[in-house]
Amino acid sequence: MLNKRKDQGFTLVELLVVIAIIAVLAGVVLVAINPTALLAKGRDATRLQDMENLHKALSLSLADGEVILTDTSGCTTCTSLTGTQAVDGSAGWVQFTIPTGRTGLSKYIPTLPADPTNTGSLVYTYASDAVNYELNSVLESTDNAAKMTTDGGDNAAVYELGTALTILN
């Protein structure tokens, strides 16, 4: 008589082989995708958009007479790490004066942006000489290195935007 197997299923060895193959494939996919680089690119995209939006808000508010630039040479809170996100001109990390009867930046932007990481050198920085202003941000991804060197500013390690790109070093 033939010996028939009553229980149909996988042996432990077969299961271990399949699990090992899946683990190897997952490792290869993770190396190929490089999630760390993708996350850095995503944070950089946020930084570039934040800086552009803030630059536009400042430009429009200056053109409309909603704000007056102030000298920030002694400012210790002019970074997104040390200042707040308030658009009132004094508590926020972007400082300016609001003329009487005007609304300031709140007409153009609800709150000041904060860097996605907002630690160490990965912060937004603002400076003004009372005539011009400069916004700075460090970009993480090596794919964006060219943006920092070709932005027209004086620091190749920082992305600079504003009306004068030599205020901050």
Image (spheres, rainbow, N blue to C red):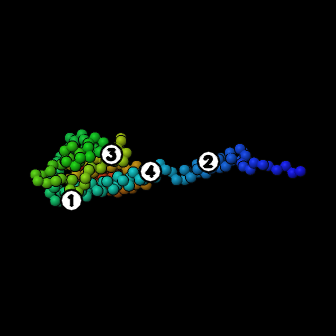
Residue type marked 3: Val
| Residue of label 2 | 23
When asked about the image quadrant of residue 51, the answer is: bottom left
Inter-mark Cα distance, 1 to 2:
54 Å
Which comes sooner in the sequence, label 4 or label 2? Answer: 2
Inter-mark Cα distance, 1 to 4:
32 Å
Which comes sooner in the sequence, label 3 or label 2? Answer: 2
| Residue of label 4 | 39
Inter-mark Cα distance, 4 to 2:
23 Å
Inter-mark Cα distance, 3 to 4:
17 Å
Give yes or no for contact between labels 1 and 2 (Cβ–Cβ under 8 Å). Answer: no
Which residue is at 21% across, 59% downward?
A: 60
Inter-mark Cα distance, 1 to 3:
23 Å
Q: Residues within 10 Å of mark 3 (few under 14, many from 20)?
A: many
Inter-mark Cα distance, 3 to 2:
38 Å
Q: Residues within 10 Å of mark 4 (few under 14, many from 20)?
A: few
Residue type marked 4: Leu
Q: Which type of secondary structure does the marked residue at label 4 adopt?
A: helix
Q: Which type of secondary structure does the marked residue at label 2 adopt?
A: helix
Count all numbered tags in the image, as a single digit.
4
Which comes sooner in the sequence, label 1 or label 2? Answer: 2
